[in-house]
Image (spheres, rainbow, N blue to C red):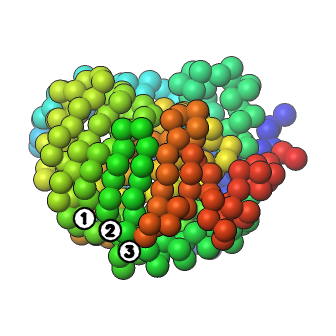
Amino acid sequence: MKDPRIDELAKTLVNHSCQVKPNDLVMIEFRESGALPLVEACVKEVTRLGGVPMPHMQSTKTMRSFYVNADESQYRAYGGLLRGLIEKIDCYIGILGGGNPFELSDLTAERKLYHSKFIWKYVHLDVRLHKRWVVVRFPTSTLSLKVGMPTDTFEELYYKVCNFDYSYLTSAIGDLATLLRKTRNVRILGEGTDLRFSVENMPVVSCTGQNNIPDGELYTAPVPGSMHGDFLCNLPTLHNGVRFEGVRLSFEGGRVVRASSETFQDQLHVVLDTDEGARHVCEFALGLNPFIQKSFMDPIFDEKMYGSFHLALGNAFLDADNGNRSMIHWDLISSQLTKDGGGEIYFDDVLIRKDGHFVHPLLKDSLSWDKLTGLDPSS
């Protein structure tokens, strides 16, 4: 029997996230055949709404020989082919997960640059992000392995995380968004972290299931040149198939001037040297999803972790644009829950969150851990 939670998730992706309308051309891109139940459910829902679905399998394993061996002209041509497809569609649903996350870890620095320039930037940053789009992971055994949980136990957690009540979060996040819009300066304190930066007059964006499932974050961008101090990324992070742990960054005048990592430090500097924009922060965000309480080793989950915050290096989103441009967008996430070392966040010298929990009078009830965990979709 088909899991009804898959149909529920498909309806969220098609209706809430992409808002599919009659005659919309909808690409449903998936990485592995294990995701077919969700692909089929999305096809059914898009068709019911009068749209035209286009499933498209894009397996990293299948394409590995190309990514490892292709020259610049081949990368350029391949990016042009993908871009041509994306330009014709109205909506994009990306179903990721499955497969080996380290499949491209041995790409040369030159080919990582080609991948960033001709696929990530030319196709996704320049075109796909201007469509109605959403990306989601599918609960494969590979994903459960990354989290370190039995597959069935992970699936229970996955559907709590993804089928969360985003309509409640949309209303509950309003006071936090208002506070951040009025804020001039942010300070973040924690183990290995002492950061100061300005967000004055920067746009603030609430994320409640529009582009990512799971979701639950609020983000803005620092004023260019305002980031000063030290930052410790205390959760592991993958970038281009490389697992980094214990990334430490020091900022002066908004730019990374010193950087280290407990793993693959040489690769860290390769990323930072992608272009000048890779050394500047394009995003500051707070995580709000209470069902994410540990690292999934995947930014689409980890950046939504309740009690976390993250900085992103590289290309700014257009809806919170501080002008930074780069071929990368790399989320570096730090948990401030007590179990992970705690920490404090201040808006204009007013304590907003302590040890991962909101303490400001306007927030401590509507965005409390107890309130949000009470929205368990299985209850």
Please name the amino acid that badge 2 sits on: Ser
Comes first in the chain, label 3 or label 1: 3
> Residue, x 58% and y 69% (percent of image)?
176
How many C-alpha atoms fall within 10 Å of the one at disc 2: few (<14), some, or many (≥20)? many
Q: Position of residue 331 (x, y in %)?
A: 38, 47
Q: Is residue 98 left or right of residue 274?
A: right
> Residue, x 54% and y 67% (percent of image)?
206
Q: Position of residue 55 (x, y in %)?
A: 53, 48
Please name the amino acid that badge 1 sits on: Ser
332 relative to 222, above or below? above
Marker disc for residue 198 = 2
214 relative to 217, above or below? above
Comes first in the chain, label 1 or label 2: 2
Out of 277 and 348, give the one closest to the viewer. Answer: 348
Residue named by callout 1: 226
Residue named by callout 3: 184
